[in-house]
Image (cartoon, rainbow, N blue to C red):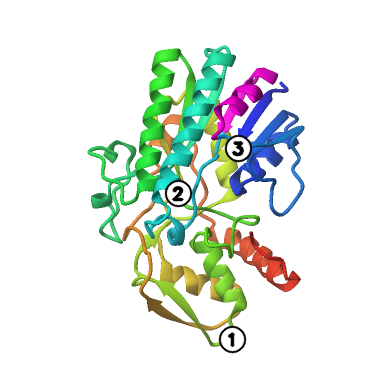
Amino acid sequence: MNKTILVCGAGGFIGTHLVNDLKAKGHTVIGVDIKHPLYEDTRCNEFYKQDLRDANMVDFIFSQHEFDEVYQLAADMGGAGYIFVGENDADIMHNSATINLNVLESARKHTVASTLKIFYSSSACMYPEHNQLDPDNPDLAEDTAYPANPDSDYGWEKLFSERLYLAYGRCYNMNVKIARFHNIFGPQGSWNNGKEKAPAALCRKVAMAEHDGVIEVWGPGNQTRSFLFIDECVEGIQRIMESDLTEPVNLGSTRKISINELVLLIAERSNKRVTIKNIDGPRGVMGRTSDNKLIKEKIDWAPDEDLETGIDKTYRWILGQIESGVEDV
């Protein structure tokens, strides 16, 4: 069945990939973002280059269409060099919270709540810092979210917005779905603009390094993460949207790898030999890996663990950007 779908954040990394997948499935897709996609033309049927912080504009978009589904991916976000330095905290909290308030209120006013599905992209950053101190044994099961203690204001805003979506779901009979993303990566993501995340930043560093070069890594390097390739993220988003889930659920990989190990993996896949130099810099929590017990139980699905294929595709894309002299903006 052809659906009319709104993708908020359609100019961003995940939003662009989601739009492309929804279009390939035959849906009518309306996109909105403060910017167009950076690396390709949008495939949306209609694209609003607008600021979702403007409540009147969000109201206008909802008044022009009858949406079957809304995917809310728009946020003020970035990697550790953006999230953990402190100077962006006010913008991160204000901008993202304002967007979520506007989208929910417009959806409430302009749609039939009981027939609309609305997806919100939360983040593993909302989990308590005290559950992520051990690189080898992070505890990120969904029911460990409280008592709340995120390690960043970005995480606090995600936690607030989760509560906001759940409250609208209860009070206005809205069909809300929430996924907590764990380090999504892949082609067409930021790679050199200060908002890039670890896989893209490290692919860039390895691509630009000489053989036997030195790669600088923030922090001790034994901090662990799991990384989810964009194709699996897009599949997971839609599986969650189609499910009966009513509570937030992790969307990520359970394959734990340290940042230093990730550097060596990228170097191996690119046939380079490198030396790691660990330096001071924002490192985030010491351990963060997706716990997929709930998603497997509820929808009988979980992402694959093929990190190598995702790294290969991402590395080749970033290398192509570098060789073409493309600037990341």
| Mark in the foreground, 3 or 1 | 3
Examine the image and state in which quarter residue 257 appears: bottom left
Q: In the image, is 63 to the left or to the right of 197?
A: right
* Placement of 74 over or under 62, stated as above or below: below
What are the residue bounds of the magenta stretch? Answer: 53-71
At horizontal 36% and vertical 29% (from top left) the residue drawn is 163
Examine the image and state in which quarter residue 323 appears: bottom right
At horizontal 54% and vertical 56% (from top left) the residue drawn is 306
The residue at which mark 3 appears reads as: 51
Mark with earlier residue (3, 1): 3
Res. 72 in view:
yes
Question: Rounded to the nearest whole Å, what is the CA distance between mark 3 and mark 1?
Answer: 44 Å
The residue at which mark 2 appears reads as: 182
Disc ID at residue 211 = 1
The amino acid type of the residue labelled 2 equals His
Q: How many C-alpha atoms fall within 10 Å of the one at disc 2: few (<14), some, or many (≥20)? A: many
Examine the image and state in which quarter residue 268 appears: bottom right
Determine the secondary structure under disc 1. loop
Task: Judge by depth and name the residue closer to the eye, 14 or 79.
Answer: 79
Does the magenta run of residues contain 222? no
Task: Judge by depth and name the residue closer to the eye, 179 or 91.
Answer: 91
Disc ID at residue 329 = none
Res. 65 in view:
no
The amino acid type of the residue labelled 1 equals His
The amino acid type of the residue labelled 3 equals Asp
Q: In the image, is 242 to the left or to the right of 245?
A: right
